[in-house]
Each structure stands twice: as C-alpha cells, then as structure tokens.
C-alpha cells in the first residue's frame, strides 16, 4: 500500500475489503468472520490473512464445506447480537445456502414482527473473465434481487468497497455483498483513511453525458466507462452510472438521467433474461415512458447455462469495451 | 453493415485453402453459424460457418480456386443493414425545407416518409411534438433511417418560435403587414407601431380560441340571480374563514358549489362533443367526474386551472382549492396536472364591473358560465313589494352540438334556483 496523501491510501479491491474487515474486527468485538478457509489459510485471495492470529479462532472461524451451515450459523449469531460476516468462497457455491438466505435471513425481521433482526453480511466473489469456467464465473445477483428483505451491493471501486462494506456491516438487516473477482487486483484507487460509510441504495454518476444513459455495475462499469471515454473523442456524450447497490435500487438517479438523455442502455455480465436490466428497463418504461426517444436496450450475458472454460466461449459470453462502445454508438445514432 | 469473410486458417500449419463448393448463391440468406462454403486444404475438408446472419452479397472466389488464408472470399450483408441502405437514399432526398405554409408538397415518396415518421415516432418525440405544436410529418429526421429524433423536434420548435413574426403572411383582405422593428415590444409593455412576438402561451391561447370558436357553434343565454342571502353569508364568515384557512372567502366557491349541483342535475352540461375518428363514430361523451376549471386572467396570460373532483368538495373545500390554484397561477407555479382534466368552466368576470359577457367555451367542454358584477338593485318581489337586493347576472355559452336551449336554459334556471335557495347560513 503506497500512501499518496495523509487523507487517503491507494488500494486495490482486495486490499479495500481486507482493510475494512480488519477495521470492523478491531473496532467491534461482536464482529465475527466465518467461511471456508478464512482462518488458517486467510481466504483464497488472502483477504483475512493473519486475522486468526490476531483475533483468535473464536472470531475467525474456519467452517466445513457446507454453505447452508455457514449462513445458518451466521443467522443465529446475528439474531443473538453478534455481527457476523459470512463468506461464501465463490458465489458459484452459494446455492446450498439459498434457503437460509431467502427463507430465513431475509424474513427474520418480518417473521418475528421486528423482535429479531438479522444484521449480517454475506460476502462473496462473483463474476467471470478470469477463465474460471463453470464453477468460478457465475453472477448470482438476479437470483436474489427478487427477494424483499435482502439488500444487495456490488461495488466496483476500492473507495466504494470500503464505504459500502462498512454500511453493510452497520445495516440492521442482511446484506449480500458481491465482489467482482476480476476487479480484485485489477482495479486500484484512492481509499479515504478512517471510518466512513456510503449509503446503501445510492447509485453514482461516474461520467456525465447528454446523449445516452448507461447503467452498469461490477467489472462492466469500468469497461463501460472506458468505452464512453473513447466515444467522447468522436463527440459522443454518454452518461455512465455505477449502480453500486442493486437493491434497494436508486430509481431517482436513473430516472433523472434518462429524462435528460432520453435513451437508456443497461450493461451487465449476468444473463439477460430476468436480469437486473429487466427490472431497470421495466421501471424506466413505467416511470419515464414519455421521455424515451429510443427503445431501451440491454447488453448482457447470453442465456446459456454457464461461462465455458474455452477462451472463445468466455469471450463470447463477456461483453468487451469495444462491443459496449458499438452499442452506445448505435443508440446515440438511433 | 457488410462483413467481409476471409479464407479461414484450417489448421496451424495451413497457409492456403481451396473453395471446394459454395453452399450459398449470391442473394441467399444465411444464418449465423450456418455453413456457407466448403473449403478443402491439404489436411481437411470443412464447412465454414457464417459469423453473421445476413444475405450473401458477393462471392469473390470461384469454386476450385485456391487462395492464401486471410484473402477475402465473400461479403455478407448483415440483417437489418440492407433495409437501412435501401431506405436511406429517399429519406436523404427529401426536401430539407417545408413549403411556406409549413406543410410539405405531396408526393408518394414523401407520404411514405411521413407515414414512416409517424410510425417511428418515439414516446419522447410524440410528447415534445404535442407540447411544442410541431407537426412531425413536416420534419426531416436526422436519426437512423430518417427517424425524427427528440432533438429534431426541439430544433423545429426553436425555429418556429424564432420565425413567428416573419411568418405572419398577408392575406388578400388584410392590411399591409406591420413591420417588425428593433424595439422590444412585449405584451406587458406594448409599443405602438410594433409587432409583439407571440410567446408560446399567447400562441396557444390564439390557437385554442380560434379552434373552439370555429368548431363549437356557440349559443348564449343569461339569467339574473338574487345573491343577497349568499352574499350576507359570505360577509359574515369571511374574516373568520381567512383567519382559519389563510384563504379569502369570495362568492366564487358558493357559485361553483351551485354549478356543480346543477351539473349533477344536468349531466349533458358536463359532457363534450367527440368528433368521428377512424376508431369510431362521433358522439357525446358524458364525463363521470365534475372538474371545474376556473378562468384566471393574468397580465400577459390566461390560465384555467382545474379543481379536481369538485363534486366531492364542500364550499370550504372549493374555496381552499381555488385559493391555492389562484395563488399558484399568480406565481406562475401551475403544473400540467393543475391545468388538465377540466369538464366545465367558471369565469368570474364581474370583478371589474362587467354586467354581461359572451365567453368562448374552453375546447372539449359543453359550456362556460360567468359570474358578472354583483349590483344592488331595486326589485319587485313576488308579493309586489319593492326591495333592494344584491343581484348578479350569470351568462352561459354552450356548445350547440352537445346541448340545445332546452337543456341549457333548464341548467341556468336550476343554477339560479339553487343559489337563491342556498340561504344565508350553515356549514361551509
């Protein structure tokens, strides 16, 4: 970590997660991390390296390979006053814990009429572009965003990782915290020192533009931004919004932008059918119909069961900055 | 967009290939991943799939010919691209400027383009065209396939406003056009001998008035109403009312309340004439809600904000709603919602002493009724005694397509009876 000023530190996303978790462990004895290999091995990306030495095996818990148990145990901890941060080693393995997340964690407050809450975070690396094939590439946000009672966050920049992870830890209800694994070491940025939070449910306009609104999140935010900046040289003005929180969704920021640009392109890596883009598209069609000057378009993963291991298959699945630029160009021209 | 297909490298050491057989002819359509040519090399014979869905435009290599890998062998026109290419030239040849009256000269090419402009108009284009009174068919689209974009409509609206004074073309009977001068003459500060450019609001007023006066055959009637009792009621309550609600208590809410009750009794007065369209024959639509528009004159504008569901409001409720709308109107804060949905209009015309007036109906309504000045008069009562009473005329303009004098005079008589019977006290 190179210190560039007294007020901030340059970090990549792995370092931002690690620094935030460390701070939470240090500042609040109720904080517990649990998951596969988070203890002795210090997590597969070394996010919790040496945590077990400093905070002990009672607060840094190596679990069996049993995701339903990881989340189930964390729910119990949260309901009884701890602040557990459960880790699913890869989002591809989250399915066994689906019932615990959807059936229990998300409904705890409602079921107990507010007597119990479930202040827990489920962190998991997701997304492709890393030759991860069928079991290390998946995006799971659409499987969970249908569920009221569950918040979903997917930051793209280190400073947002810290602020949103702090907010997720502070939140009185369960938060699914998605970390795009390709951005882990690829993306670096200034992270303010000291404790701060970024409110859940607030999108961020990364680049202002007048001819098209692009909404994205995760790795693709970086590529969409790159594409939009390339088009700037041709006099094409594209506004790029980083969703940051998938649920709650920041309708206001999206609608204000679309009402100005009159065109909307949603870009995400997850499959197109029933994806996050479907909800954004429906919302904008319902609330900004008379502002639209072009059909809403979604550039998203194809509806195939998985991202193949072979590079051409992975490339076919993923959208490139070039494809994003082409889609933007077509929509502006429309 | 045309995609050029090159001879693929079928194997790591292969440097050339032979077109064994074309599986498609020029003009054939081909699906993405569908084999369109068989290529043979010294190692393999293989079908080559098309990378795009489209139509074979060119085959550049003869069967049996051997070319180096990377050499172009075919051109495929992608789906969608061909129609763009074919449709673009006529759109580009469309005349850039509409004729002086703002309408294009007719020709088959253009009417096709006009149809296209309407069919392809996005929600934003339709909304902006409506708001700015721009005819989409007169525009030359700058978008894909000649599509009219939202920006095109806004540009046209700016042009129309800029060109407004100049386009006041003289008609044969009209006097010579007034020359536009450099002095700034406005509606609020008119300078004699100058032409005041129309603001959008003035233009809309002009259009609406002409439209209403020319489409709805106006008929007119008037009654004289004894408002002494309600006047006394108002006078007694007004100070307390203003203290409690912050709004002035005028005769208007009493009058509107009576109008609403009369509209309930005469639903045809709360109706509108619907001309025949392609989707159906003409008819008279009877509104289910009663939303009273209140005409409010401003120094340079006329607005008619609407009290929504007036039929569900008491006199007090009407007074507050009207007070709020009048306040908003004076501050220029009325929203689209405040101005829409009116089914009948009341014009408080008497404030400046007018004794009778013939108002123009607000388009799409059956009538408009006025409150003229309240004047003390000596009247002969039913028992032949003389009395000094507060009298007010109320004038009605009606759309004779919707109602005849029979209904209209019944309505006016009913209104008079209700106001006179309203009494001089009670719950507001």
Image (cartoon, rainbow, N blue to C red):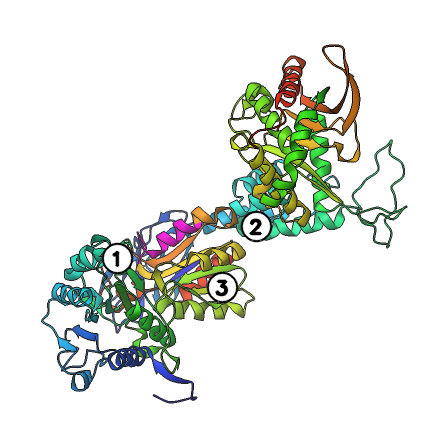
Image spot of residue B361 (x, y percent): 68, 28
- Quarter assignment of residue A129: bottom left
Over which residues does the magenta segment extend? A271-284
As drawn, the label of residue B149 is 2
Q: Which is more N-terminal, label 1 or label 3?
A: 1
Which residue does the image show at 52% across and 29% down from the upper left? B289
* Residue with the mark numbered 1: A144
Query: Is label 1 in a helix, a strand or a loop?
Result: helix
Residue B287 in view (yes/no): yes
- Label 3 with label 2: CB-CB less than 8 Å: no
Query: Is label 2 in a helix, a strand or a loop?
Result: loop
Image spot of residue B139 (x, y percent): 63, 45
**Circles 1 and 2 on the same subunit:** no
| Position of residue B338 in the picture relative to residue A59 (left or right) | right
Badge 2 local density, few (<14 within 10 Å), some, or many (20+)?
A: many
- Label 3 with label 1: CB-CB less than 8 Å: no
């Amino acid at each position: 970590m190179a210190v560039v000023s007294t007020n901030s530190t340059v970090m990549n996303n792995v370092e931002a997660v690690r620094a935030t978790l460390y701070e939470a462990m240090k500042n609040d004895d109720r904080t517990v991390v649990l998951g596969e290999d988070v203890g002795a091995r210090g997590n597969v990306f070394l996010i919790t390296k040496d945590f077990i030495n400093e905070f002990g095996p009672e607060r840094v818990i190596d679990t069996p390979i049993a995701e339903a148990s990881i989340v189930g145990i964390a729910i119990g901890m949260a309901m009884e006053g701890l602040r557990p941060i459960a880790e699913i080693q890869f989002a591809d393995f989250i399915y066994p814990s689906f019932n615990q997340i959807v059936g229990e964690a998300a409904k705890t407050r409602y079921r107990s009429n507010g007597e119990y809450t479930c202040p827990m975070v489920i962190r998991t690396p997701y997304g492709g572009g890393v030759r991860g094939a069928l079991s290390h590439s998946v995006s799971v946000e659409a499987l969970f965003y249908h569920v009221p009672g569950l918040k979903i966050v997917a930051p793209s920049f280190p400073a947002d990782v810290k602020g949103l992870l702090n907010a997720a830890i502070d939140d009185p209800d369960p938060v699914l915290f998605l970390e795009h694994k390709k951005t882990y070491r690829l993306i670096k940025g200034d992270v303010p020192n000291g404790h701060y939070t970024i409110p859940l449910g607030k999108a961020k306009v990364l680049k202002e533009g007048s001819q098209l609104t692009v909404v994205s999140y995760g790795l693709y935010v970086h590529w969409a931004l790159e594409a939009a900046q390339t088009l700037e040289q041709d006099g094409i003005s594209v506004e790029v919004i980083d969703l940051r929180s998938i649920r709650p969704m920041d309708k206001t920021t999206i609608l204000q932008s679309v009402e100005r640009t009159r065109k909307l392109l949603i870009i995400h890596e997850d499959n197109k059918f029933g994806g996050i883009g479907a909800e954004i598209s429906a919302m904008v069609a319902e609330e900004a119909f008379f502002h639209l000057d072009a059909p809403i378009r979604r550039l998203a993963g194809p509806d195939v069961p998985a991202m193949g291991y072979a590079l051409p298959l992975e490339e076919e699945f993923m959208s490139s900055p070039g494809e994003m630029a082409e889609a933007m160009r077509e929509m502006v021209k429309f | 967009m045309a995609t050029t297909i090159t001879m693929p490298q079928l194997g790591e050491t292969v440097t050339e290939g032979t077109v064994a057989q074309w599986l498609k002819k020029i003009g054939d359509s081909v699906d993405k991943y569908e084999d369109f040519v068989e290529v043979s090399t010294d190692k393999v014979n293989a079908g080559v799939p098309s990378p795009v869905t489209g139509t074979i435009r060119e085959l550049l290599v003869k069967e049996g010919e051997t070319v180096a890998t990377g050499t172009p062998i075919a051109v495929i026109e992608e789906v969608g691209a061909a129609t763009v290419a074919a449709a673009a030239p006529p759109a580009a040849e469309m005349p850039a400027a509409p004729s002086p009256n703002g309408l294009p000269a007719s020709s088959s090419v253009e009417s096709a383009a006009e149809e296209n402009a309407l069919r392809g108009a996005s929600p934003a284009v339709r909304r902006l065209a409506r708001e700015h009174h721009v005819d989409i068919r007169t525009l030359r689209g700058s978008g894909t396939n000649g599509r009219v974009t939202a920006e095109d409509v806004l540009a046209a609206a700016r042009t129309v406003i800029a060109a407004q004074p100049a386009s006041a073309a003289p008609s044969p009977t009209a006097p010579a056009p007034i020359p536009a001068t450099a002095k700034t003459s406005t509606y609020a500060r008119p300078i004699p001998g100058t032409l005041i450019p129309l603001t959008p609001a003035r233009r809309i007023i002009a259009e609406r008035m002409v439209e209403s006066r020319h489409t709805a055959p106006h008929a007119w009637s008037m009654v004289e109403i004894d408002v002494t009792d309600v006047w006394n009621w108002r006078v007694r309550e007004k100070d307390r009312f203003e203290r409690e609600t912050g709004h002035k208590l005028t005769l208007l809410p009493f009058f509107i309340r009576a109008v609403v009750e009369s509209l309930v009794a005469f639903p045809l007065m709360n109706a509108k004439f619907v001309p025949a369209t392609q989707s159906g024959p003409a008819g008279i639509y009877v509104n289910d809600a009663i939303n009273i528009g209140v005409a409010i004159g401003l120094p340079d504008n006329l607005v008619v904000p609407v009290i929504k569901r007036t039929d569900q409001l008491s006199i007090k409720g009407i007074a507050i709603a009207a007070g709020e709308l009048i306040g908003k109107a004076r501050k220029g804060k009325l929203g689209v919602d405040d101005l829409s949905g009116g089914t009948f209009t009341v014009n408080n015309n008497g404030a400046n002493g007018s004794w009778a007036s013939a108002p123009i109906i607000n388009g799409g309504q059956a009538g408009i009724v006025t409150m003229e000045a309240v004047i003390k008069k000596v009247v002969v009562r039913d028992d032949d005694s003389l009395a000094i009473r507060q009298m007010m005329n109320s004038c009605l303009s009606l759309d004779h397509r919707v109602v005849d004098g029979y209904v209209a005079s019944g309505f006016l008589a009913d209104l008079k009876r209700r106001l006179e019977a309203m009494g001089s006290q009670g719950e507001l």
